[in-house]
Amino acid sequence: MKTSLQTRVSVLITLIILSISVICHVSFHLSAHRSKEREFRGADPRCPIAFSKAAEEGLLEKNRNLIKKVRHYPGAGRLADTGLFEQLGSG
């Protein structure tokens, strides 16, 4: 079975377009991956540690403030009996 010239040209053009799109897609993903790696390597490794310490200190301060407010309410003595206040308050 012989195919016509128009069919062969159409298939050839389709294959060329598909191959170009695949090459562009792969190169885009490779450049994005390299960019992420470059950004990750350039970051200071101590930065996440500093962020986590700051967040922990902020939460401890919030807990202390909350404990101070709650101690004034009736029934707070039961929580103090469990040791929760002392544990969080000493932080």
Image: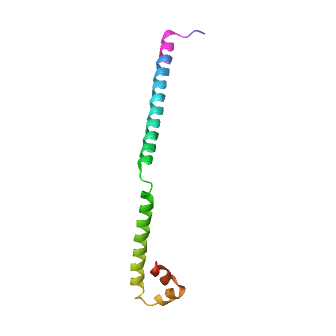
Q: Is residue 11 left or right of residue 67?
A: right
Depth order, front residue of 42/89: 42
| Residue at x 40%, y 66% (from the top left corner) | 54
* Residue at image location 39% in from the left, 79% down from the top: 65
- Residue 8 within the magenta-colored segment of the rendering: yes
In the rendered view, would you say 10 is above or below 54?
above
Q: How many marks?
A: 0
Quadrant containing the N terminus is top right
Left or right relative to 88: residue 1 = right
- Picture coordinates of residue 84, whole percent (x, y): 51, 82
Q: 81 or 36: which is nearer to us?
A: 36
Q: Nearer the viewer, residue 5 or 46?
A: 46
Q: Nearer the viewer, residue 64 or 40?
A: 40
Q: Which residues are magenta?
A: 3-10
Residue 86: x and y in percent read 49, 84
Where is 43 relative to 62, above or below? above
Q: Position of residue 9 (x, y in %)?
A: 48, 14
Colour mapping: rainbow
Q: Dominant secondary structure of the magenta stretch?
A: helix
* 66 horizontally vs 15: left or right: left
- Residue sitting at x 41%, y 50%: 43
Q: Position of residue 71 (x, y in %)?
A: 42, 87
Q: Is residue 12 above or below residue 65?
A: above
In the depicted structure, whether residue 7 falls above or below residue 64 = above
Q: Residue furthest right?
A: 1
Name the quadrant containing residue 24.
Answer: top left
Q: Is residue 1 magenta?
A: no
